[in-house]
Image (cartoon, rainbow, N blue to C red):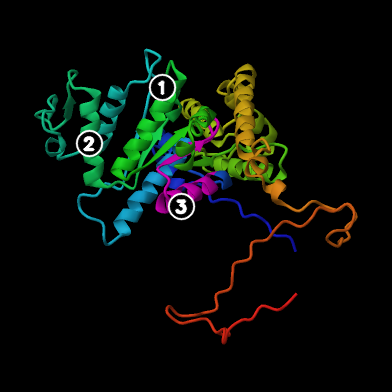
Amino acid sequence: MSSVTPSPARFPQEVLEQPIVLRHKYFENKMVAHRCLTQAHTQLLQALRYPAGASLIFVVGPTGVGKTTLRSRIERQLIADAQADPTTTPGHIPVIGMEIPSPETGNFSWKDYYTRALLAVDEPMLSDKIAYGVRGMHRDSQERLVIERNITALDLRRVFEKCLLHRHPRAFLVDEAQHFKKMSSGRRLLDQMDHLKSLANLTSTVHVFFGTYDLIGLMNLSAQLARRSVKIHLPRYCADKPEDREEFKKVLRTFQRHLPLAEEPDLEGRCDYFYERSLGLIGLLKDWLTKALAAALEANEPTLTEPRCERHAHDRGTLEYVMEEIKKGEQALQRMEQGSGKLRKLLQIDAASPPATGSGETQEPGSPGTSPPPAVFKPRKSKGSRVGQRTPNRDRTGRETPHAG
């Protein structure tokens, strides 16, 4: 007897009686724990709990796949872990998160980065974390943090290091981390990542970077950086994989049942349409439905129709461009994971293996067509004699007389 997947529960009926803003907010805050998101969440949480020498974690995936949702979920998980841990100190901050913007000048600014990081920490005892000689940081009359323009990036880093050392966060999360690459020199790009690795090591704080496939180029800039890094992939759902198509349909069914409308729309029946216009990206699908829902609620429509969805979908030309970028990223990630086949050659594994005879039969050593066996080092066996104790042998007696020839 085949098992039937139960339909997800609908939204609470009292939501329909709420104002439009709250009905829209209900769906906007709705999270669906689909397979790819759950797998990435599990991998990331395990890497944070057991870093095993890793100081940098890269979470990569296409735009609109749900990386920001993953970041929100991991933040809530780390806070819950801290609340349940009896050894947690009152001064502990479980997790700190921020998003870095694209630099206006085209070059990444460490001063801007550390300013935003300190604002994200919102350290209540900031005056006690300021290094000697640092000026330009204080709180105003409303206890808001003020960072003046004359303070240097080096001073900001020192203060930030102190904050991390005193608050012991489990992780420092950075969204849109591909903006680290906005540099004019490849050498400076390596300096960027060495700077972050040093910061993570000195403060014993794992740094997690969420970004697009552009982050792939930051992982293997040096051997030391690669050894200290962990890569986690949050992929899209692919139409050529039956299990992915089924999972996408299940997510679509969940969304349609949680749209706070008088009549439930049939999104699942148009699964191919919604897949095509979202590229299999759950984040893109959710944003699309959220915008269409807002318009339907404002127009007092009882359900969500296909014409309404079409008016708020991305045009196919834009989606083609996005898909081309995704394909390039997926191919780059695949090359990185599979390598070029040189590893065994570099390790000389095949050269150390005995040559195959080609017939499957064992040949005796020294027979024609075989190479002599390699010399095997055999250690000398110890006879177990003690220091000062003579080895047993026959002593010479008498006088030797030479024999005549």
Q: Which residue is mark 1?
A: 188
Residue 279 visible to the viewer: no
Q: Quadrant of the N terminus?
A: bottom right
Q: Residue furthest left?
A: 141
- What's under tag 1, amino acid-wise? Arg
Q: Earlier in the sequence, mark 3 or mark 2?
A: 3
Write down the residue under mark 2.
Answer: 122
- Sequence-wise, which precedes: disc 1 or disc 2? 2
Residue drawn 14% across and 24% down? 136
Give the magenta part as a residue range. 37-66
Give how far across and how far down residue 55 sits, in percent.
40, 43
Left or right: 321 as drawn, with respect to 289: right
- Marks 3 & 1, CB-CB < 8 Å contact: no
- For the C terminus, which image quadrant? bottom right
Q: Is residue 360 left or right of residue 246?
A: right
Q: Identify the residue position indicated by label 3 in the image.
A: 46
Identify the amino acid type marked 3.
Answer: Gln
Residue 404, given in percent of the width and then of the height, sits at 72, 77
Q: Residues within 10 Å of mark 2 (few under 14, many from 20)?
A: some
Can residue 54 be found in the magenta stretch?
A: yes
